[in-house]
Amino acid sequence: MLSFYYNFSMELKKVKYERATSIISFLFVFSVFIGNLVIISLNAEPKIKIPAIRYCIPVIHGICSILSFIIIFKFSYAILFSMLQLESIICIITKLEILGIFFYFISIFLIFLIYYQTKPVKYIVCISYAIHIFLLGCTFTYGWQNFLLNIFTSCYMFVLFLWVYNLLKVKFSCFKPSMIMNNSTIGEKIPGTKLKLSDYNLSERQIFFTLDFINNNLSYNDLTEKYYVSLSTVKKEFAEVFKIFGVTKNDELKLLLLQYVVEK
């Protein structure tokens, strides 16, 4: 009963920004998909003269529509990244290069914010950027002015991204002590992914205390009032949690766990 009450209250309080983004993404991509079908059915003058590519475009928009619909109910950064990458490619092919560049760099910012500590992501970004530049290079057939504008815009966005990324990396590095950056309990778990407290041998009481402490920012006194226990009991339970996660105080525990999506 306690578990049901907690989960229900968390769902009511939590603002689902990712779900709102997913819904808007679906509406946008699906409307483009329908628009492509209408253009084909009316036999309008196509932007792309090659039939194979022309008929492939609505198929890819349809795939992206399905992916965006899926993440409304089960959000996934990997699916969102893939969808944005596909839409970026299609926009560049269909002479909407600036929109394609926008989609590409949104996906890059997103993937770095979530998985910035992992080397494979850096390789993925490098490969995807090489493909991105190659596609922009092919836009010289649209005219040299468009070609130069696209290349300069993409290079500017890339340099801007590196600048912002390094600024954030420097500014926030001081908030992550070595025991948090190299935590032996959590290991190499990727920041931004789900972390289940039940995987770390916490008791049910410790799990609910920790969830409320991290997600709802409840103090020790708040926890005593909510769960009808003494202050010494709360302190004792957190002392055990500190030992489990290899930290020594509240701030360190919060800094450690806020890197992840903490669940029961």
Image (cartoon, grey):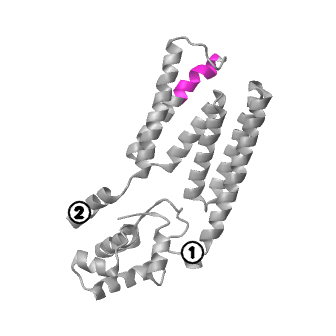
Q: Position of residue 167 (x, y in %)?
A: 66, 64
Crowd band around label 2 with a 10 angstrom C-alpha radius: few (<14), some (14–19), many (20+)? few
How crowded pointer 1 is (Cα within 10 Å; few <14, some 14-19, many 20+) is rated as: few
The location of residue 188, given as percent across then percent down, is 55, 66
* The disc label shown at residue 5, or none: 2
**Left or right: residue 15 compared with residue 114:** left
- In the depicted structure, whether residue 218 falls above or below residue 189: below
Which quarter of the rendered picture does the N terminus lie within?
A: bottom left
- Seen in the picture, residue 260 relative to 202 is either above or below; the reply is above
Q: Secondary structure at mark 1?
A: loop
Disc 2 marks a residue whose amino acid type is Tyr
**Front in this rendered view, residue 216 or 61:** 216
Q: Are marks 1 and 2 in contact (CB under 8 Å)?
A: no
Front-most of residues 114 and 240: 114
In front: 150, or 136? 150
Depth check: give the residue in front, 21 or 255.
21
Which residue is under mark 1?
Answer: 175
Q: Which residue is depicted at the point 30% across and 88% down?
A: 232
Looking at the image, can residue 52 be seen? yes
Return the x and y of residue 32 as percentages of the image width and height: 50, 28
- The CA span between labels 1 and 2 is 34 Å
28 left or right, relative to 51: left
> Which amino acid type is shown beneath numbered disc 1?
Phe
Q: Over which residues does the magenta segment extend?
A: 51-60
Residue at the (52%, 30%) spot, across then down: 61
| Residue for point 29% across, 86% down | 231
Q: Which mark is residue 2?
A: none
